[in-house]
Image: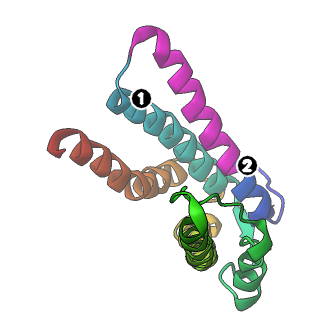
Amino acid sequence: MKFPQRYFIDTKLLSRSTVGIILLVIICVWISGQSSHRSLFQNSVISTSILGTAFLLFISLGLYYGLKLKDNIGHVLTKENIKKLSDKTPEIGSIDFDGPALGDGIGGIIVSIIAWIVISIVLVFLLYFLGIFFWVVVLLFTAMLYWIFFRALRLVFKNSKYCRGNLAKSLGLGLFYSFLYLSWIYGIIFLVNYLL
């Protein structure tokens, strides 16, 4: 069979479609499990099995057709991304807080005002630092998933020059890499179910 020189898939397109497919499968399995009263463990195993089968087919066919990934996402965790996301933290004027009523009279009013100011300042600093922390954690998690999934996939598809047109070799390597990618997920599911 004659194949074109190379197939390239954009990493950005692949990452968006992967997230969409994962969410769609999980939601469909969860909705279908509502009527049959499946447990979270059963839904997790079914979802992972469906996604694992799709992943096996994707890798095997990608190796068979000589698929390559084109990295067009770049670095996820940069100073500019952290700065851009930290700008989304709440500003001082966006907090509306009503302090507790401390009593009648001038003493209660003064204590209420002081408590309101102190609590507002503490909340502003907490929201600011927790906002930065939240976005940095989101960026770190995204960078981790990107490296684990897409960088490793690029390494997998470097074997496509050896597997192009050879279905047995493509399926063998697809099974091997699918086992490597999915065994730890199954391990976590079974550990959580039987140990906790």
In percent of the image, x 28 and y 50: which residue is there? Answer: 187
Furthest residue to the front?
Answer: 105
Main SS of residues in magenta = helix
Q: Which residue is mark 1?
A: 43
- Of 33 and 105, nearer the camera is 105
The local crowd at label 2, few if under 14, some if 14 to 19, many if 20 or more residues have their Cα within 10 Å, is few
Percent position (x, y) of residue 17? 73, 48
Furthest residue to the top?
Answer: 35
In percent of the image, x 25 and y 45: which residue is there? Answer: 192
Identify the amino acid type marked 2.
Answer: Ser
Query: Taking the image as drawn, is residue 13 in sight?
Result: yes
Furthest residue to the right?
Answer: 4
Identify the amino acid type marked 1.
Answer: Asn
Q: Which residue is mark 2?
A: 17
Query: Taking the image as drawn, is residue 10 in sight?
Result: no
Reply above or below: 70 against 49. Answer: below
* Numbered range of the magenta stretch: 18-37
